[in-house]
Image: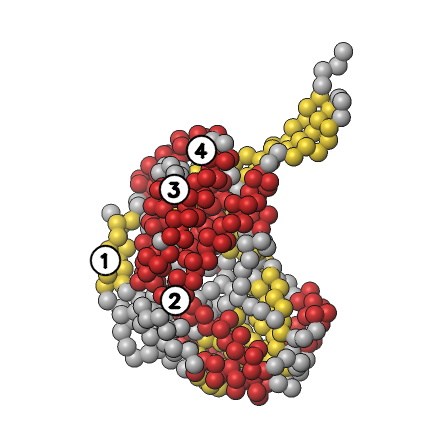
Amino acid sequence: MLAIERTDPATGEARDALVADDAAAVARKYEAARAAQPAWAARPFAERLACIERFRDLLAERRDGLAAIQSKETGKPIKQARGEVGATPGRLDWFIQQAEAMLAPSTRLDTPGLTEKVTWEALGVVVNVSAWNYPWFVGTNVYVPALLAGNAVLYKPSELAVDVGLSMGQLLHEAGVPADVFQVVVGGGATGAALLELPIDGVFFTGSHATGVKIAQAAAAQLIPVQLELGGKDPAYAADDVDPKATAEGLADGAFYNAGQSCCAVERIYVHEAIYGPFVEAFAAAVDGFVMGDPAHEDTYLGPLTRAAQIPVIEAQVADAVAKGAKVLRGGHRLDKPGAWFAPTVLIDVDHTMEVMREESFGPVIGIQKVSGDAEAVKLMNDTAYGLTAAVYTHDLARAQGILGALDTGTAYWNCCDRVSPRLEWTGRGHSGVGSTLGEVGIRAFVRPRAWHLRAPQG
C-alpha cells in the first residue's frame, strides 16, 4: 500500500496520511474510463456543455469553502486562494462560449462532384498530471476543454493538493459528468508513472522541467500527444522612461505574489542605470509592506512555502549569490519558526554568474541587476534555457515591441506581468515546455482531425 504523509506547511505539524492509488488501482480507473468514454463522446455537445455550465455555477456558489480547503492544504493566503477560486468561473466562460465553434466540422471544398471536410474527434482517455500552486487555474485549463471535446480524464492532482483535486471531482460529478468519465487519481511519482504505462491517448502535465522531460520520454513510445507546461525564469526590464516607484511596486507584486510560487512569477529584474537607485529603494519599500503571517488571516500577503523541500534550494541560491558578490538587501534566510517559512528576499549587485539569475527559484526571492540600456537588457533576458514570459516597462509601445520581439518567449508583457488570459494561448519555449493551453489552440489540443474526401458517384 502506498501512503502520502501530509504536513501543514504553516506549522510543520503532521496532518494525516493518504492512501495512494497503486498500479492496480490506477489500471482499474483507466479501464472504467475507457469503457465510459465512447458514450460520453456520443452525447450531444449541448449536454456536455450543460454539465460544465453547472460546474461553473457550483464553483462560484461554493467559492469560500473551496478557498478554505486550498488555503489549509497548500498554505496559500486565504485572500489569494479566494481570488483564484473566484476568478476561475470567468476563465471557464471562454471555453463555454468558444468550444462549440472550435470543435464544429469544417467544410473546405463543396462542389457538385466533390466535398472536402474535416471533423474533430476526441482523443479518448487523457491523463492530466496537475500542479499545486494554482490548482484551479491549471487544472480547469486542461480538463474542462478535454471534457467538452468528449474525452474521459484521469486527473492526478499534485500530492500537495489532493483535497483540492477531490473537491474538483465532487463538483464535476454533482454537475452531471459521469463518475467514470472524470476520475481523480491520488498519488505521487509512482502513481504518475503507473498512469504513463497504460495505453492512454494523451498526457497533459504542469510542473517542473525535470519531470516534464521524464513524462515526454515515457509518452514517446506510444506516440501520443504531449502538452508540457513547465517552469520559467521570467525576466522583466524597467526602462529609463518609467516611474521608478510605480514600476517597482508592480514588479514586487509580480515577484512575490503567492510567495513567488508561480511559473510566470517575475524571477529576475533588469533596471536601466538611469533609474536604478530610486527603483531599488521603492522595491525594498514595497517588500517591507508585505504582511507575512497566518494564511487564514485576511491581511496576510505572504504565507509559507507549500513545499518545504524548496527552502534548501533557495538558501543555496542566496549563498551562491553572496559568495559571488551580491548584497542581500532584504531577507535572505528561513524564518526561525515551525513550518516552511522563508523571508522575502531581495538581492542586488547580481550578475549571470549566479544561480539566482539563471536557475528557477520558485520562491520569495528576486535578483535586481543594473543595465546600461535596451541592448544589454535584451542580451541578459535571452540568456536562459527557459522561455515562458518576459515583461518590458516603458512608455513607448514601439520600443517595448522591439525588445519583446527580440526575446525567445511564449508570452510578452508590456507594462504588466504575471497575468494569464483565457483568450490567449499559454505556451512556453525551451525548458518552459511544449504545446499550449488556453486560447483556440488550448481547445483543439484535445481533439484530432479526420479528413473526409467525399466524391459523388459518376454516371
Residue bearing the label numbered 3: 175
| Residue drawn at the location 57% of the way across and 45% of the way down | 98
- The residue indicated by pointer 4 is 40
User: Label 1: which residue?
Assistant: 16
Chain-order first, disc 3 or disc 4: 4
Kindly identify the residue that appears in the image at 57 percent across and 87 percent down: 278
> The disc labelled 4 sits on which kind of residue?
Trp
Residue bearing the label numbered 2: 79
Where is residue 341? Give x, y as percent.
Answer: 34, 74
Residue 321 in the image: state x and y as whole percent. 48, 80
Q: CA distance from mark 3 to mark 4?
A: 14 Å
CA gap between label 1 and label 3 equals 29 Å
Distance in Å between CA atoms under marks 3 and 2: 26 Å
CA distance separating discs 4 and 1: 36 Å
- Of residues 321 and 130, the one nearer the viewer is 130
- Whether the residues at callouts 3 and 2 have beta carbons within 8 Å, the answer is no
Q: Secondary structure at mark 2?
A: helix
Mark 2 and mark 4 residues within 8 Å of each other at the beta carbon? no
Label 2 is placed on what type of residue? Lys
Discs 3/4, front:
3
User: Where is residue 178 shown, x and y percent of the image?
Assistant: 38, 36
Q: Mark 1, mark 3: which one is toward the viewer?
A: 3
For marks 2 and 1, give the CA distance: 25 Å
Residue 182, image quadrant: top left
